[in-house]
């Protein structure tokens, strides 16, 4: 059974001459004041050396990367609206595994964001375009974001080749009647990934989705909701894999008190996957029920959905989530159980915890989730990571991070893939407008055989503009 996820990747940093690997920390230029019109940017010079960049078993050759980056952003905002435009041009100098240096120029990347708020409505839209060289792309890795949240990897299959990858993403969301008795929502999303000069296991893919809903207050404690969702995904494999999903739902929410909320609903679900030689369809009515208990610093929620497909046993999905806040940290957990058409039960988990310890911060994340591979197969990806950062002085900070992942193919007998990354780094503020950073990483990957690699990156970053 496939799972489709529309992932919107908003390009945050903009580089005019990038001669580096994807390990380059790409950070959106930060404005120094609120409101008005601003043109801001960041200049970065980075050098990186890697042993066994492609993590080939037995590989020991050294790869070198030099990166000069100019990031630019134009932002204008008022109390009711915001517009932001980011652009990125890349020129990469790459010496892979002892080969001669190649210079690769890419098409400028662009990212546009627009939002507008009124007393009773909200509009948000974003569009992005990015092209990268496969010679400088690592395989997917779990990593922590600037806010401490852990992002697990998707398909662990390496993106090998001498060509390029192009990503186009877009989203649109509109809400009416905020805080009123009737609230309406509408959203659209799309993503396309294409490869040129890539290996045969890297397939072009595209996804589009749409949703609409209305929430209406019946009385002070009873609220109704009607929603509809649809999605289409295609992967250009030799079998021309495609999938269509749709569902509608009508439900009620009952506020027993300020602490406890109950919900229930009925609906209909359609899910079809088609190739040149097969067609699998799953459809039928659904019923669901759930609750939400909100205490002072703790929230607990759960729900059960039952699908009644034609001529088959019912399929169950159950979820339970818990979140807790402390004065110096927070933690959350989401557990889900799902029965499949083959009679199996799949368990998925998402865990996250953050804790301030003196002048440092400790972050933890773990997950076990369903993903879709580039060939359309179902993957069960288990990942975990831990990171610790500390301000040693007012100008110097230290960070170390560990992340691991394993991918299991649920549709074929393909060998499981696993990876491990250990990183340690430091950052020093040379002045109010310049930062020097260095990071060492050790990577290990296992498919049929084990492979190891090391990398060292040094960079200077200079922001400008206001």
Image: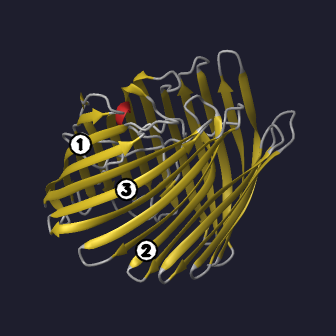
- Answer with left or right where residue 304 lies relative to residue 6: right
For marks 2 and 1 on the same chain, the one whose residue lies earlier in the sequence: 1
Give the CA separation, mark 2 to mark 3: 20 Å
Classify mark 2: residues with Cα within 10 Å, few (<14), some (14-19) or many (20+): some
- Seen at 73% across and 29% down, the residue is 281
Residue 276: x and y in percent read: 65, 15
Question: Residue 66 got which mark?
Answer: 1
Residue bearing the label numbered 3: 440
Q: In front here: 248 or 132?
A: 132
- Answer with left or right where residue 449 lies relative to residue 33: right
Classify mark 3: residues with Cα within 10 Å, few (<14), some (14-19) or many (20+): some
Q: Quadrant of residue 350?
A: bottom right
Residue bearing the label numbered 2: 361
Q: Examine the rendered structure and indicate whether residue 349 appears above or below residue 379.
A: below
For marks 2 and 3 on the same chain, the one whose residue lies earlier in the sequence: 2
The reply to whether the C-beta atoms of the residues labelled 2 and 1 are less than 8 Å apart is no
For numbered disc 3, what is the local secondary structure?
strand
Residue 24: x and y in percent read: 31, 48
Q: Examine the rendered structure and indicate whether residue 94 appears above or below residue 72.
A: above
For numbered disc 1, what is the local secondary structure?
strand
């Amino acid at each position: 059974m496939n799972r489709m996820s529309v992932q919107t990747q908003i390009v945050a940093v903009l580089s005019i001459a990038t001669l580096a690997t994807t390990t380059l920390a790409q950070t959106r230029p930060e404005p120094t004041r609120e409101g008005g019109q601003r043109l801001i940017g960041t200049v970065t010079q980075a050098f990186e050396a890697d042993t066994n960049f492609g993590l080939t078993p037995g590989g020991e050759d050294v790869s070198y990367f030099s990166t000069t980056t100019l990031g630019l952003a134009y932002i204008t905002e008022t109390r009711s609206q915001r517009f932001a435009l980011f652009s990125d041009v890349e020129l990469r100098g790459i010496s892979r595994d002892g080969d001669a240096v190649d210079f690769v120029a890419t098409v400028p990347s662009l990212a546009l964001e627009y939002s507008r708020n009124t007393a009773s409505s909200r509009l948000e839209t974003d569009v992005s375009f990015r092209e990268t060289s496969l010679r400088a792309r690592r395989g997917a890795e779990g990593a922590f974001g600037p806010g401490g949240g852990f992002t697990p990897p998707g398909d662990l299959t390496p993106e090998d080749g001498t060509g390029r990858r192009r990503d186009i993403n877009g989203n649109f969301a509109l809400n009416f009647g905020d805080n009123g008795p009737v609230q309406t929502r509408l959203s659209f999303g799309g993503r396309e990934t294409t490869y040129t000069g890539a290996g045969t296991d890297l397939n072009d893919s595209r996804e589009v989705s749409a949703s609409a809903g209305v929430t209406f207050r019946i009385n002070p404690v009873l609220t109704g909701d009607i929603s509809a969702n649809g999605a289409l995904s295609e992967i250009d494999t030799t079998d021309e894999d495609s999938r269509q999903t749709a569902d509608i739902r009508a439900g009620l929410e009952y506020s027993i008190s300020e602490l406890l909320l109950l919900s229930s609903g009925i609906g209909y679900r359609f899910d079809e996957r088609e190739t040149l030689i097969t067609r699998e369809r799953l459809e039928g009515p659904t019923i669901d029920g759930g609750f939400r208990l909100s205490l002072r610093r703790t929230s607990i929620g759960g729900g059960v959905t039952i699908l009644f497909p034609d001529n088959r046993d019912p399929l169950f999905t159950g979820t339970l989530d818990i979140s807790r806040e402390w004065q110096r940290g927070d933690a959350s957990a989401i557990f889900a159980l799902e029965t499949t058409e083959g009679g199996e039960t799949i368990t998925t988990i998402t865990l996250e915890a953050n804790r301030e310890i003196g002048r440092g911060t400790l972050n933890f994340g773990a997950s076990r989730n369903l993903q879709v591979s580039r060939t359309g197969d179902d993957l069960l990806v288990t990942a975990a990571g831990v990171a610790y950062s500390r301000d040693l002085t007012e100008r110097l900070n230290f960070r170390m991070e560990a992340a691991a992942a394993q991918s299991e193919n649920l549709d074929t007998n393909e060998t499981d893939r696993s990876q491990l990354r250990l990183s340690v780094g430091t950052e020093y503020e040379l002045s109010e407008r310049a930062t020097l950073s260095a990071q060492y990483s050790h990577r290990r990957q296992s498919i049929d055989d084990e492979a190891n690699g090391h990398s060292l990156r040094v960079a200077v970053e200079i922001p400008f503009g206001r």
